[in-house]
Image (cartoon, rainbow, N blue to C red):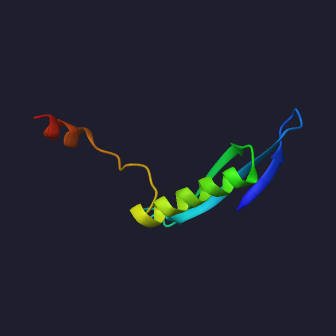
């Protein structure tokens, strides 16, 4: 979803909010929000790239946390 907003100096910028899936751990919906695009077309292109990446690579999430013990075992 593309939205338009105004900065304090009056310039217009665009942002998007995209649904990228359900978090398997919490079961909550995961959304990504990006802003600061100068044109609506730039925002739409960035949103499309994100959605294609999610579709191709799977769920868009931060890397899993690794424990100290796992790091220790790798290091040895």
State the image coordinates of residue 12 (x, y, percent, origin top left): 83, 43
Q: Which one is in front, 31 or 43?
A: 43
Q: Reply above or below: 53 against 9.
A: below
> Looking at the figure, which quarter contains the N terminus?
bottom right
How many numbered markers are drawn? 0
Image vertical order of residue 45 relative to residue 69, above or below: below
Q: In which quadrant of the rendered image does the C terminus lie?
A: top left
For the question of whether residue 4 can be seen, the reply is: yes
Visible residue check, residue 24? no
Q: Residue 11: x, y in percent?
A: 85, 38
Q: Looking at this view, name the residue that lies furthest to the right.
A: 10
* Figure check: 18 above or below 34: below
Q: Residue furthest left?
A: 76
Horizontal side of 26 relative to 44 (left or right) equals left
Task: Tell me residue 16's x, y (percent).
Answer: 68, 55
Q: Residue at x 80, y 52 (%)?
A: 4
9 sits left or right of 23 in the view: right
- For the point 25% across and 38% down, the residue is 68
Q: Position of residue 47 (x, y in %)?
A: 61, 57
Instruction: State which quadrant residue 67 falls in.
Output: top left
Residue 61 in the figure: left or right of residue 33: left
Residue 16's place in the image compared with 58, above or below, is above
């Amino acid at each position: 979803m593309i939205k338009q907003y105004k900065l304090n100096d009056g310039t217009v910028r665009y942002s998007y909010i995209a649904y990228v899936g359900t978090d398997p751990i919490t079961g909550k919906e995961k959304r990504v929000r990006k802003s600061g695009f100068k044109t609506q077309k730039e925002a739409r292109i960035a949103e499309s790239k994100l959605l294609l990446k999610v579709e191709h690579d799977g769920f868009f999430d931060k890397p899993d946390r690794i424990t100290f013990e796992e790091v220790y075992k790798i290091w040895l």
